[in-house]
Image: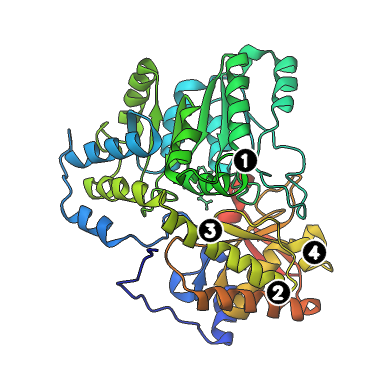
């Protein structure tokens, strides 16, 4: 058995309750406006907020900061080739940079783009290039209680119907997001990845995998899918991606770094076009907006991310949070996904009508109660979308300890114990672009 020990401690403080109350009011009841120093346990995101290993820090010290032909880029290329099976790599500053580069090359005005479920930035980049992003989740993705093993899957029949409707040549790209962040971090099965490959061939479309959480997805395949339990996770991780024509990657998730990303492609002609576009938006094609240090750290992080020791501890911690919440009768999305536990705010605070944002009310209450910061992914973040009213508690990688997990579960439990007191919210001011309102809108209790 092997595991990690921690070599750097960061203090974190729980402010007194009246201070939390004041900061929340000052933040306009929007936790994106809180300073990180005001937060005790920060579960806003698992993106770029994790801790790096000693090997990653050591690699950073030896990094090559050359503008062109950096050795650290070569290390990253080798790691991507070895761990993910793509030999043509276009580095970018983070995941959405990779989306801009790739989707800008593949999508044209009037195209229709299916995805198991688009993450916000993916949806925005498809739309920015004139495409219509269409979610095609498998049946049951919105069933918060079923124990189906792969609720993140794509429904190929929905895509076929879409193709029959709009014409197959209007669908240039099919995207699969693994794990499916917008469906509670649920995994996608290898069988579904293979089916999506066949579907893309039928439509003569490019098959793209959004690989942000590819290692976590591979862990679930090894645990739940027939024929994979005795295979090394690193091998499964590679096999998943072997079916895709291209990948977009945010290194801030399973790259185990604080910033960085890349596109991986197979087709040399697409590679050339992606490189040219990246020079415009990201930087020269051997750094793409990252420092040499960032690339060196990601090269090491990708290899660490597919180890059984790391993944067992990682997914285990997310599951522990789910178990502790269930012990406190907190309604959550089951099974628990890869990077976060999603609380069903409609059931948690049934007295608050949807127009008064029960999810955002719960987010505020978690901060008020225990200095915990989560994020609302329901009626406040996605106005007009038919989605369950969820609050995501995302665990940064290799950061928090069991005592923090306990504190979070106790905090949510304590809020539910006095749920009748919790009031709904109304929007006081919001930005022009409604799609981005949860980042900066201000609210007040009704
Ligand atoms: N794709 C998925 C599935 C993501 O979850 C994210 C980011 C991105 C693309 C964009 O990557 O942030 O590096 O530009 N998700 C973060 C989150 C922000 O909190 O879930 P990025």
| Image quadrant occupied by the N terminus | bottom left
State the SS at label 1. loop
Question: Which residue matches tag 3?
Answer: 315
| Residue at 58 percent of width and 42 percent of height | 119
Of callouts 4 and 2, which one flags the residue occurring earlier in the amino acid sequence?
2
Q: Is residue 256 visible?
A: yes
Q: Is residue 26 visible?
A: no
Question: Which residue matches tag 1?
Answer: 226
Question: Residue 327 has which mark?
Answer: 2
Question: Which residue matches tag 4?
Answer: 347
State the SS at label 4. helix
Where residue 64 appears, x then y in whole percent?
A: 16, 45
The one nearer the camera, 309 or 112, is 309
**338 is higher (above) or lower (below) than 424:** above
- Circle 2 crowding by C-alpha within 10 Å: few under 14, some 14–19, many from 20: few
Where residue 12 appears, x then y in whole percent?
A: 43, 78
Asked whether the residues under the numbered discs 3 and 4 touch, taking CB atoms below 8 Å apart as contact, a structural biologist would say no
Of callouts 1 and 2, which one flags the residue occurring earlier in the amino acid sequence?
1
Residue 284 falls left or right of residue 368: left
Question: Residue 196 has which mark?
Answer: none
- Circle 1 crowding by C-alpha within 10 Å: few under 14, some 14–19, many from 20: few
Circle 3 or circle 4, nearest the eye: 3
Of callouts 3 and 1, which one flags the residue occurring earlier in the amino acid sequence?
1
| Quarter of image, res 441 | bottom right
């Amino acid at each position: 058995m092997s595991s990690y020990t921690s070599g750097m401690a960061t203090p974190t403080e729980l402010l007194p309750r009246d201070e939390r109350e004041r900061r929340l009011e000052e933040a306009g009841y929007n936790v994106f406006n809180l300073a990180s120093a005001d937060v005790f346990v920060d579960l806003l995101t698992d993106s770029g907020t994790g801790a790096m290993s000693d090997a990653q820090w050591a690699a950073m010290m030896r990094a090559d900061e050359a503008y062109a032909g950096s050795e650290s880029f070569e290390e990253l290329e080798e790691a991507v080739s070895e761990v993910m099976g793509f030999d043509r790599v276009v580095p970018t500053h983070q995941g959405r940079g990779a989306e801009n580069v790739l989707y800008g090359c593949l999508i044209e005005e009037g195209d229709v783009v299916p995805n198991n479920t688009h993450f916000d930035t993916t949806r925005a980049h498809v739309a920015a290039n004139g495409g219509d992003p269409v979610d095609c989740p498998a049946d049951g993705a919105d069933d918060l209680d079923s124990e189906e093993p792969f609720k993140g899957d794509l429904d190929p029949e929905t895509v076929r119907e879409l193709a029959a409707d709009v014409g197959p040549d209007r669908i240039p790209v099919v995207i699969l997001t693994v794990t499916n962040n917008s469906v509670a971090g649920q995994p996608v099965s290898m069988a579904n990845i293979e089916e999506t490959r066949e579907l893309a061939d039928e439509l003569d479309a490019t098959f793209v995998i959004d690989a942000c959480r590819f290692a976590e997805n591979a862990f679930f395949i090894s645990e739940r899918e027939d024929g994979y339990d005795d295979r090394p996770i690193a091998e499964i991780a590679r096999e998943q991606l072997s079916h895709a024509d291209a990948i977009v990657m945010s290194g801030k998730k399973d790259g185990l770094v604080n910033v960085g990303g890349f596109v991986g492609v197979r087709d040399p002609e697409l590679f050339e076009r992606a490189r040219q576009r990246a020079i415009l938006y990201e930087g020269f094609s051997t750094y793409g907006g990252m420092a040499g240090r960032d690339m060196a750290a990601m090269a090491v992080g990708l290899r660490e991310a597919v180890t059984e020791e790391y993944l067992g501890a990682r997914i285990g911690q997310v599951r522990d949070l789910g178990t502790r919440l269930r012990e406190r009768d907190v309604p959550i999305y089951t099974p628990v996904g890869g990077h976060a536990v999603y609380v069903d705010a409609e059931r948690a605070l049934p007295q608050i009508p949807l127009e008064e944002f029960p999810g955002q009310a719960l987010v505020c209450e978690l901060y008020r109660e225990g200095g915990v910061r989560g994020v609302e992914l329901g009626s406040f973040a996605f106005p007009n979308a038919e989605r369950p009213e969820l609050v995501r508690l995302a665990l940064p990688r290799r950061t928090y300890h069991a005592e923090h997990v306990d504190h979070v579960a106790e905090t949510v439990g304590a809020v539910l114990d006095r749920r009748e007191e919790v009031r709904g919210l109304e929007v006081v001011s919001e930005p022009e672009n409604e799609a981005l309102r949860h980042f900066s809108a201000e609210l007040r209790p009704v």
